[in-house]
């Protein structure tokens, strides 16, 4: 297990994406990293694998840019890199939602840490006694690999289908505390912002997503594995490649 895998993202305005792509491509290739970095006007999304030394070096490089100084990568280990090549890509969004008015950089929705969420789920309610609803914002093939116990999901094929389905079910969340979650935090952050904007009162995003939850508290209240977008397929709660494999 000598390969370190990291994922992280940051919603921040990027106006120099072409130059940034050239610089990051050169640095990643020099460090013999593999994976994908997505650059969009709304921010950066990073999935990289390499030696401990190379990963530490690229994180230092990213954090040297004031825009990325607070990046907090999630880590897991594997025997081999789960990516075949290194790519730095320009995208319209780092996660496609097709809703330009949702701008996390302008202000995040409240978040809940993994340990606090586990405490709520242990109790069956939040600290004020409200029922907690876990809202899975991922696509159907991701949910099939595993999800939180009794989580709500909308059986969507692509993320841009989520908001219309949410609008249909909006009244279901009255009087409840809703925790939106996804693999690493990007989708649930956008969803939580939108839910607050449409008047759903008690909304949180799971800080760092399922992978951070696994890292900090294990698999409590979660059944199955977590789909990841690399050659490992799915990760178990100990952040190791699971024996089964889910295909899209």
Image: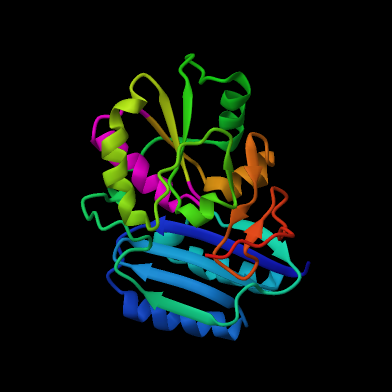
Residue 66 seen from this side: no
Residue 175 occupies quadrant: top left
In the displayed structure, would residue 168 be above or below residue 80?
A: above
Residue 162 lies, in percent from the top left, at 33, 48
**What range is drawn magenta here?**
182-202
Q: Quadrant of residue 50?
A: bottom right
- In this view, the residue in front, 99 or 141, is 141
Q: Position of residue 9 (x, y in %)?
A: 46, 58
Residue furthest right as drawn: 1
* Image x and y of residue 43, in percent: 36, 62
Residue pictured at 46% horizontal, 17% vertical = 130
Q: Residue furthest left?
A: 101
Residue 151 is left or right of residue 215, and the answer is left
Answer with the quarter of the image where residue 75 lies: bottom right
Residue ID at (68%, 41%): 219
Does residue 199 belong to the magenta stretch?
Answer: yes
Q: Tell me if 227 is positioned left or right of 177 in this view.
A: right
Check the image and report above or below for 27 versus 236. Answer: below
Q: Quadrant of the N terminus?
A: bottom right
Q: Is residue 66 above or below residue 219?
A: below
Which residue is located at x 57 percent, y 20 percent?
124
Residue 229, image x, y percentages: 54, 65
């Amino acid at each position: 297990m000598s390969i370190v895998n990291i994922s992280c993202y940051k919603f921040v305005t990027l106006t120099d994406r072409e130059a940034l792509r050239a610089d990051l491509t050169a640095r990643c290739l020099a460090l013999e990293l593999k994976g994908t970095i997505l650059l969009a006007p709304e921010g950066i999304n990073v999935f990289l694998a390499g030696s401990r030394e190379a990963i530490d070096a690229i994180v230092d490089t990213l954090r040297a840019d004031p825009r990325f100084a607070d990046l907090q990568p999630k880590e897991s280990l594997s025997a081999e890199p789960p990516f075949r090549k290194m790519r730095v890509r320009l995208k319209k969004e780092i996660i496609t939602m097709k809703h330009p008015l949702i701008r996390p950089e302008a202000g995040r929705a409240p978040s809940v840490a993994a340990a606090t969420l586990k405490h709520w789920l242990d109790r069956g309610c939040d600290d004020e006694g409200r029922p907690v609803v876990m809202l899975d914002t991922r696509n159907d093939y991701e949910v099939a690999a595993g999800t939180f116990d009794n989580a709500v999901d909308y059986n969507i094929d692509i993320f841009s289908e989520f908001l219309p389905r949410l609008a249909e079910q909006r009244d279901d969340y009255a009087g409840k505390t809703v925790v939106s979650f996804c693999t690493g935090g990007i989708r649930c952050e956008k969803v939580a912002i939108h839910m607050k904007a449409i008047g759903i009162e008690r909304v949180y995003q799971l800080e760092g997503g399922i992978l951070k939850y696994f890292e900090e508290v294990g698999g409590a209240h979660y059944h199955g594995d977590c789909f990841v977008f690399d050659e490992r397929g799915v990760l178990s709660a100990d952040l190791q490649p699971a024996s089964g494999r889910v295909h899209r």
